[in-house]
Image: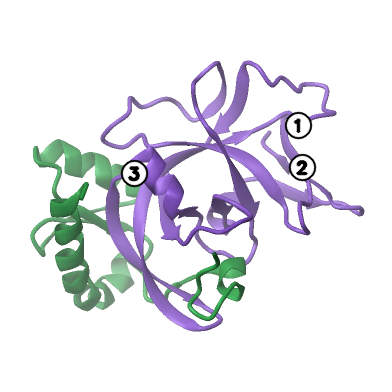
Chain colours: A green, B purple
Amino acid sequence: MPFAKQEREIEENFLFFLSAAPGLMAAHEGEFALLRQKRIVALYSTAAAAAAAGHDQFSDSIFSVQRVIDKPYDLGFLSNGSSNGAIV
Amino acid sequence: MVQATGRLSDGKPIIDVVVVESIGSQPETETGYTNLALPVRPYRALIDTGATISCVCKHVVKSMNLRPYGRIPMIGSTGQSFHKTYIVTLGLMYGGEGQADYAPNPLSFYQIDPGEVAEIENNAWFDLIIGTDILTRFTFTLRKGGAFSLDLS
């Protein structure tokens, strides 16, 4: 499976980030967190900047990027497609 | 005026886009107008003013070998689900048929700053969704009769 190590890193960091995000909202809402091994390395104004910093800092490119938000994105049209939000 | 134009397809505003994975695997290029003869594959993108983030279908992720970067919660009519995210550069193809500047070859597209997109299931109508995160950078006009345009000026 391509990106298997990266997928694991994303999952672990995401679970950590769910608990960390509320504390970041006041000062960093909408910014993008660069995460490595369940730790926030830094925050950036764009996803691309966070990803570029991750590739620069970590030679194995194992890291994740999470946006600081307190509510889910809206699926829009797609959500009307089926009972599970997927249309096939 | 440079515009991405189209007409409703099955009642849906669909435009042609190209996808470039620029972060970590491709050389960076400047945002703006590009006029290149590249072996890029056009995809069909739904313009969806109800989506707050742009999306890519799973088959696009697979064919472009996109690298995942994170996960996000998304909510729809049936509740919340979690989706993988990718950071991609999209190019909006401009100069539709009937336009004075229509030029099918070389391929013409307006390249947008790389941004976060969410993965969604495949479907029969489109390959990507252009949400309000991208739409709000331009002027979108839907006209009587179903023609629409996205002003890229």
Is A11 placed above or below B31 here?
Answer: below
Q: Of the residues under marks 2 and 3, which one precedes in the sequence?
A: 2
Dot 2 corresponds to which residue?
B6
Can residue A46 be seen?
no
The front one of A36 and B64 is B64
Chain under numbered label 2: B
- The reply to whether dot 2 and dot 3 touch (C-beta < 8 Å) is no
At 14% from the left edge and 59% from the top edge, which residue is drawn? A9
**Which of the 4 quarters of the picture holds residue B24?**
top left
Chain under numbered label 3: B
Instruction: Mark 2 vs mark 3: tell me if same chain.
Output: yes
For marks 1 and 3, give the CA distance: 28 Å
- Identify the element where label 1 is drawn: loop
Can residue A64 be seen?
yes
Q: Which mark is residue B66?
A: 3
Dot 1 corresponds to which residue?
B96
At 58% from the left edge and 52% from the top edge, which residue is drawn? B130
Q: Of the residues under marks 1 and 3, which one precedes in the sequence?
A: 3
Q: Name the amino acid type tagged 3.
A: Leu
- Identify the element where label 2 is drawn: strand
Q: Of the residues under marks 2 and 1, which one precedes in the sequence?
A: 2
